[in-house]
Image (cartoon, rainbow, N blue to C red):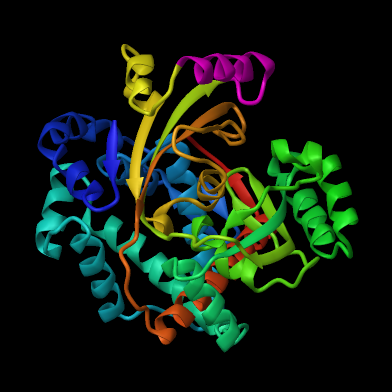
Amino acid sequence: MTRTAHNSILHRLAILPLMALALLMTAPQTLAQGMFGPVIKVNDSVITGYELDQRIRFLTLLRAPGNIPDLAREQLISDRIQIAAAARADVEPSEEDIQGGIREFAGRADMEPDQFIAALAQGGVEEQTLRDFIRSGVAWRAFVRARFGNSYTPSPADVDRARAGLTGDGNVRVLISEIFVPLSMGADRAQALAAEISGASSIEAFASYARRYSAAPTGQRGGKVNWIPLAQLPPQLRPVILGLGVGEVSQPIPVEGALALFQLRAIQEAASQQRAYDEIDYAMYYIAGGRSAPALSAAARLDAQIDTCDDLYGVAKGQPETVLERVSAKPAEIPADIGLELAKLDAGEVSTALTRNGGETLVFLMLCNRLPQGAGDIPADEIALQLKNGYLSSYADTYLAQLRAEARIIEVGG
């Protein structure tokens, strides 16, 4: 299964005519008695069965990866929390803001808003569902800018170092350690532990925490990661790392099933030039069993059998197509935890550090190729904006995780 960042939405919407009939045939069940009753309570707000059904349809049409009903629930819960936080700060998107968001979203599929809305309607998705989806995202971004916008201003030195990493004109590399605090221990406990780790006063203290608590395989060696060129780190992680002094620890960053923390152990100019990349091609083959011994053994056997990402198509033949994902995307569009693992790999190499579905599925992650970035000057103000946006994204993710941990979330129906 191939999915590119540039045409993914257009490709997905191409299946609307085929999918619409199947979806519409279920409409009578969707509108059955009680469909408009609450199924989830989030603090003082409710999510109805109809809203959940609509979000499931919406994500299905977009071919969102993973368990779509679970993803729909998680998104709607986050939406409610984000809208409430924005409202408390007197942040309310205007109609112009919402229409602009719809234009931007539709534009990713090379469609005009009316065309996009009509395409969704063929699959049984109401325009209001799209508006609600856009509204929460616009409100949250405005709230984050208002709350955290003045928290960080990149210095000229930050910009110079970032340019080196972004353009490949320099040769900066970093030595970091990592800890992934699993949310399976409970959100409150994970938050408290992550806050404690972020105050680690030395490299030795961080390593001790890693050995005791990290869910990543690197925990066994104190969380230590080998030298990584700055240009290969996920763009959203670069400003976080560049903002650290040697020995300092980042604030917790929410990733799939964990809170990630990073410590900078060293930064230096490498002996050779480093290159930045326009696009990363990678594959994910999903193995049931999480990090259990049978699953890891199956991954090791698979690693010994294949040499390239193309070999995985033969392995996945005859299985559900969801068992294999082949992705080609810009570095900024790749999830941070996946991007970090890819940064450690050369083409054809594999990582089994990640899981999905609450730890029940092992991710066999393989780097297929990196497509180099063309040369060119990037304006300093553009780099500064990228750095600031990276910091804002980190602050926003951490704050949302905190709000979710504090929220009263009750499932009242299915």
Position above or below: 149 against 164? below
Question: Residue 369, image x and y in percent?
Answer: 38, 42
> Which residue is more in the foreground, 310 or 209?
310
Question: Residue 126, image x and y in percent?
Answer: 22, 53
Q: Is residue 103 among the parts visible in the rendering? A: yes
Residue 341 falls in image quadrant? top right
Question: Residue 70, image x and y in percent?
Answer: 48, 38
Q: Residue at horizontal 54%, vertical 73%?
A: 392
Quick check: is 278 in the magenta stretch? no
Q: Is residue 409 left or right of residue 33?
A: right
Q: Is residue 406 left or right of residue 140?
A: right
Q: What type of secondary structure mainly makes up the magenta span?
A: helix
> Which residue is more in the foreground, 173 or 207?
173
**Quarter of the image containing the N terminus?**
top left
Q: Residue at horizontal 11%, vertical 64%?
A: 112
Q: Residue at horizontal 69%, vertical 48%?
A: 225
Numbered disc total: 0
Position above or below: 51 against 93? above
Farthest front residue in view: 271
Position above or below: 278 against 217? below
Question: Residue 269, image x and y in percent?
Answer: 62, 67
> Which residue is more in the foreground, 158 or 79?
158
- The magenta region covers 289-305
Q: Is residue 153 left or right of residue 321?
A: right
Quick check: is 299 in the magenta stretch? yes
Residue 92 falls in image quadrant? bottom left
Q: Is residue 407 among the parts visible in the rendering? A: no
